[in-house]
Amino acid sequence: MPVATSSRRRKTIRQASSDIEEDQGTQRGRAREDVDDDDEEDDTSARRVKPGKAAAKKTKANGIARAHQEDTDPDDDDEDDRIDVETFADQPLSRADCPKIHGLSQDWANLEEIMHQPSAIINGAAAAMAEVAGEEAQEARAHHILDRIMKGLLDVQALMTGHSKSLSDIIQNITKGDDITDANARYLALVDDMNAEYDKKTSRQKYAKNTEYIEFKETIWEVDHPGTAMPPITDDIPREPGDESDDDEDVVMGGITQEYKCPLTMTPLQDPYTSSVCKHSFSGEAIKDLFKGKIGPQRCPAAGCSKKYTLAMCKPNPELAKKVKAFERREKARRRQQDSDAEDVVD
């Protein structure tokens, strides 16, 4: 086997190894050059980026400083939007404000309605005092005190009505297109005018035609004069300058005799119903039976009354029911007293 071939093959292999080493060295050199170039590029980029980051940080710091300044001094930005209260003119009321004003007016009306409730308490106290036998001077003094309390209550009701009406007048002015910029001053002025007008009235003008005051006087009268019509209420209210003449029919009209017997059953009223048309009262079951099966208004069953009405026009009258019970209690007390007096006479 030729040796030359073998030697050449080894030589070729060694040469290849050297070539590889040279190639590897060349590649390493190139790699270093590439790395060096990359490092240079990175350094250049870093040098280029650093000023940008610094600028961004500086901008951010400036923004924080400005925000801090705005937080510490917020009025600077709103300086143009601030309202000078001292020079800001009152704005006129509009139709959108009417519901609020109406709510205030209704509040006064509700208070005035509540002030009607003590009337029944005062009437009950007056009746109880009248029923208790005592010295005439003491009874008169007690009735005088209750009379003064009742009048004071009516005065308060009139005051509250004035407040409610004043607010209603302002609403009407707004709806008419009036330019109202002084709502508070106008409201107070209207209230003052109504109070002054009420104060100018005489006692007769304030109370003689007031339903609650008339009922109060009737309660006391009926205790001592059962079944007898109360005389004109003006008899207890002295005439003052400005009052109408006592000869005036509307002023001297006397009280109406209160009947405690039902015109249908001729027995004491039970669960009384009162007609809103003629003011006659009937026992509840009796008036219901009268209208049963009938259509339309019917003539009043009370003697001498020609008014016509329906059952819906008759309403329960709890106050009258209380009066009936008080009347029956007084009648029983009188009968016992009469029986006692009769026994004393016989003995």
Image: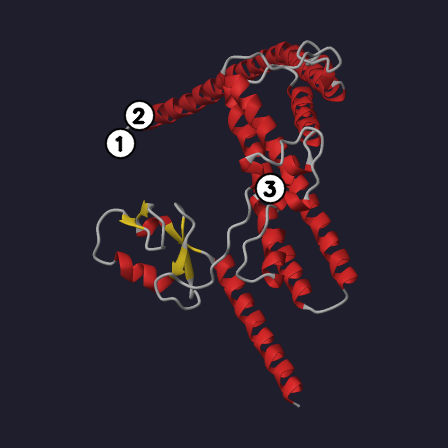
Q: In 3D space, how far apart are the residues under numbered discs 2 and 3 (Cα atoms)?
A: 137 Å
Residue 130 position in % (x across, y down): 67, 63
Q: Residue at x 57, y 77 (%)?
A: 335
Which numbered dot is residue 13? Answer: none
Residue 185 position in % (x across, y down): 69, 20
For mark 2, give the secondary structure. helix
Q: Which residue is mark 2?
A: 5
Q: Amino acid at mark 3?
A: Glu
Mark 2 or 1: the one toward you = 2
Q: Mark 3 or 1 closer to N-term?
A: 1
Q: Residue at x 47, y 62 (%)?
A: 260
Determine the image quadrant of residue 162.
top right
Labelled pair 2, 3 in contact (Cβ < 8 Å): no
Labelled pair 2, 1 in contact (Cβ < 8 Å): yes
Q: Which residue is mark 1?
A: 1
Residue 254 shown left or right of residue 150 in the figure: left
Residue 121 versus residue 72 in the image, above or below: below
Q: Which residue is mark 3?
A: 112
